[in-house]
Image (spheres, helix red, strand yellow):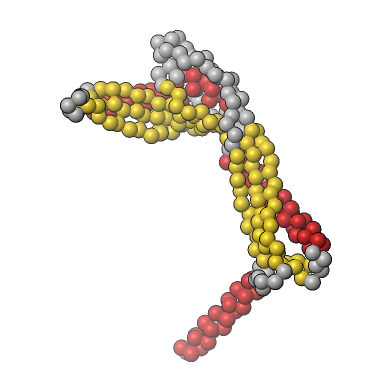
Amino acid sequence: MKNTLLNKAAIASSAICLFTAMMSGAQAAPTGYDQLSFQTEVKEEVANDEVRASLYKKLQATDAKTLATNLNNSINKALAIAKRYPTVTVSTGQQRTYPRYDKNQKIIGWTGQANIDLKSTDFIATSQLIADLQETLVMESLNFGVSDNKKDALEQKLMTDASRAFQNQAKNLTRAWDARNYRVVTVNLNTGNNYPRPMYSAMNMRDASAESVPSQNFESGNSTISVTANGTIELTK
């Protein structure tokens, strides 16, 4: 019985090895003769459809407990305002606290900063939310890019285009070298994104005591999504 089980295991192992060898053959293992390596690239410019922003509150206090309490209250108030805008994803960002010293290196107080981060494809709602938050918080950064869903869909399309471009180039090179045909040795697909710095309308900073802060008109700009196909083919005479 034990020998029978061992024989079955050996047969199964042989079948797996045979399948692996067949798959390796489909990838056209290199022989070192008449091989050409090259790269093709396809790209497409697309409008940025996502805005990301980070705002912060910076405070000082004579002790760490008071500082933490005041910062938490400020951030909680900001998060409560953000709940009015359900199309904007809001998350608490980085927080840091550090002591302040006098000339004798004695701690005389504490400084702390807490951030909240925004992300959305709803530019109008985000702009208004930023304006509301800027009555008590300070803008740290504002960036535009392509949302994951839009980028993934475009990359899938560009992968197909890059694959076709690679095959067309392989055919052209085959003819140029007077070869009868070719087979692919290796090929790799790589994605790349180029997010140029977007332009957006400037807004004068208003004092927190002002009645309200006007919202910005966003100009999100464009990004370039690219896919490259690089690999090696072997010519057959």
Position of 191 relative to 95 (above/below): below
Confirm whether residue 209 shows in the render: yes
Q: Position of residue 233 (x, y in %)?
A: 70, 64
Q: Position of residue 13 (x, y in %)?
A: 55, 79
Q: Quadrant of residue 26?
A: bottom right
The structure residue drawn at horizontal position 70% and vertical position 47%, both measured from the top left corner, is: 42
Q: Is residue 82 left or right of residue 72?
A: right
Q: Quadrant of residue 220?
A: top right
The structure residue drawn at horizontal position 53% and vertical position 87%, both measured from the top left corner, is: 7
The structure residue drawn at horizontal position 72% and vertical position 50%, both measured from the top left corner, is: 161
Position of 32 relative to 201 (above/below): below
Q: Judge by depth and name the residue closer to the eye, 103 or 107.
A: 103
The structure residue drawn at horizontal position 46% and vertical position 29%, both measured from the top left corner, is: 54
Q: Position of residue 141 (x, y in %)?
A: 48, 28
Confirm whether residue 153 shows in the render: no
Q: How many numbered marks have been drawn onto this rendered protein structure? A: 0
